Amino acid sequence: MHNAAFAALGLNWRYLAFEVRPDDLRAAIEGARAMGFVGLNLTVPHKLLALKLVDALDPSAKKWGAVNTIRFESASVDGRLKIRAVGFNTDADAIVAALRKDLKLKLRGAKVLLLGAGGAGRTAALRLAMEKVAELYLVNRTRSKAETTATEIQERFRSVRVTVGYPKLAVDLLINATSLGLKPGDRLPLDEKQFPLKQARAVYDLIYRPAETPLLKAASKAGRQTANGLGMLLHQGAKAFEIWTGKPAPLEVMRRALEMEVYQSTVSSPQSATQLKKGRS
């Protein structure tokens, strides 16, 4: 996605992926700074850890409490020019952009069931609350984590009704922000005895590989509108590209490259994702 965009704009840059253990994240960021990297993307579990490892936080990272993008930039510190690491969050806005693009949903006033309340789920919940959804139902394997996210939403967005647990009636949107569906044979991320899929008007899975998770397959069979996480991956990546380069992202170039890489296909597939590789430009 990024390398195709660099090529389209004639930039002599390269995006690479690296495996980094949480204990080595500080050293990795310092190493990238020392080697002249323009920036980084961070995926789980680094997004929360990075909050304390960068020199400054963009308002987006402060607002959503996570860093998934870092930009290295020159700054004057005590009269000396230094390279500082600034943390950004491009995930939150990407979720909303993907839902609007892929499912054509009007989020204001909507009723949403969110599966998974930590990490990506927390970010999704807060961003949906900012869009003034009417009702938000949070379901998480560890109930206390859902309760913590619910409390945060109630403190920051008082107009949104937040409930921990399944709704009794239909919702406009069901979102899966858990990892269930990544592996073959994974069970569904929800308890259909408590909430049948037919009670959701649309179903969105943040997972993008496989393209059709068991949840999306079941939702399609139930006649529900569905989309996966590819669109979110695209939109957060496009914003990171703009943060690094200062140039508008060639969105369609990036979409085509992403679809070919993920699905080995040139067929347009408006979908979306949450997981990003650690890399550089």
Image (cartoon, grey):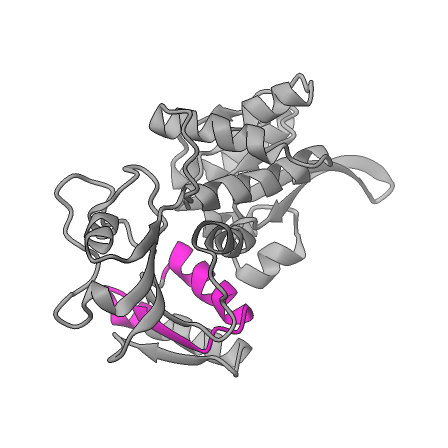
Residue at 48% in and 54% down: 95
Residue 104's x, y, as percent?
47, 56
Residue 119 can be seen in this image: no
Residue at 42% in and 30% down: 259
In the foreground, 73 or 184? 184
Quarter assignment of residue 170: bottom left
Left or right position of 277 against 217: right
Is 139 included in the stretch rendered in magenta? yes
Position of 182 relative to 59 (above/below)? above
In the foreground, 222 or 139? 222
Quarter assignment of residue 141: bottom left
Numbered marks: total? 0
Residue 189's x, y, as percent?
21, 57
Residue at 41% in and 33% down: 20
Quadrant containing the C terminus is top right
Left or right position of 190 against 117: left
Left or right position of 38 against 15: right
The residues colored magenta run: 118-146
In the foreground, 59 or 262? 262
Residue 162's x, y, as percent?
40, 79
Residue 197 can be seen in this image: yes
Left or right position of 208 against 280: left
Residue 85's x, y, as percent?
65, 41
Furthest residue in direction right, as rendered:
79
Residue at 65% in and 30% down: 38
